[in-house]
Amino acid sequence: MARKVLVLGEVRDQSLRNVSFEAIAAGKTISEGGEVVAVLVGENVSTLSTELIHYGADRVVTVENEKLKHYTPDGFSQALLTVIREEKPEGLVFGHTALGKDLSPKIAAKLSSGLVSDATDIEVAGGNVVFTRPIYSGKAFEKKIVTNGIIFATIRPNNIYPLDKDDTRTGEITSLSVDIKDLRTIVKDVVRKATEGVDLSEAKVVIAGGRGVKSEEGFEPLKELANVLGGAVGASRGACDADYCDYSLQIGQTGKVVTPDLYIACGISGAIQHLAGMSNSKVIVAINKDPEANIFKVADYGIVGDLFEVVPLLTEEFRKLKVHS
């Protein structure tokens, strides 16, 4: 059954987030040969349209307005609902990001539709689109189908591989004018904390530190390793509570959920709340002085030792491999 599927392209700092391309791939599966239409909402975002087509979108619809410069639920929902009324899709796909988790239920509720959130896999079976999503903090998985109305879904970053980029693909790019009004929230300015390197939620490699790093300076060897591997630095709640790092780095049940190709846990004991945020990583390496640490139960590879001795050795070896590769 061919379907028209809308995919929200998510923009950060005038660049498309990787989850936008993963959402297009998800839209292709849901559409079953139908049309995948990418939607860009914001201010001066039309220049990003071509990239979405190169990654598989058949068409792009842009909604540009100065009131959409910063995300607000009211503004973005007005814009997206207008696109939905114009396009009449059978499915919508969002990234399972802070924006997607906030906006998708608002839109679904207004259209009296169900929502499958945090999908990690999508397949078509017996004419139904079947979503797989983790439950009980990743201890089990369930399969869901939408039986009525528009298919709404959010996808977890780094789980659905994007299509290969094809710079020769072409597609129609149109703009839609929307009168944004009655905003209850107006963002005057956004103050960002200084961050370096790769976005944690989309990183392919994550180096995470726990209480075992002992201090803010203890994160320096982890940052050096992350830099060599082109990855991001994360932390357990224990490290954040101890003021070793900012809470924006927290991974776990009350922090970010990450699913990188490689997760290296340094000085992390492995509390269940932390495991909920990283246990679905493809390869997990644990470094801890305590051979009985719970983190070793989920690790693919374990190193019993002092992280301040092990991490620099790993960094040096990876540097040598990069030089010879």
Image: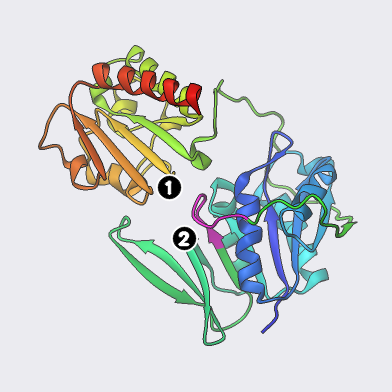
Nearer-the-camera pick, 285 or 12: 285
Residue 195: quadrant of the picture: top right
**20 to 223, vertically: above or below:** below
The kind of residue tagged 2 is Thr
How many callouts does the rendering have? 2
- Who's the residue at 56% across and 65% down the image? 153
Callout 1: SS:
loop
Which residue matches tag 2? 120
Q: Are marks 1 and 2 in contact (CB under 8 Å)?
A: yes
Please tell me whether the stretch drawn in magenta is mainly helix, strand or loop.
loop
Residue 93: % across, % down: 62, 62
Q: Is residue 199 left or right of residue 234?
A: right
Which residues fall within the magenta stretch?
Answer: 154-162
Residue 290: % across, % down: 12, 30
Nearer-the-camera pick, 226 or 85: 226
Residue 219 belongs to magenta span: no
Which residue matches tag 1? 259
- Who's the residue at 37% across and 39% down the image? 263
User: Residue lying farthest left?
Assistant: 292
- Residue 253 seen in the current view: no
What is the distance, in whole Å, between disc 1 and disc 2 at their CAs?
10 Å
User: Residue lying farthest front?
Assistant: 324
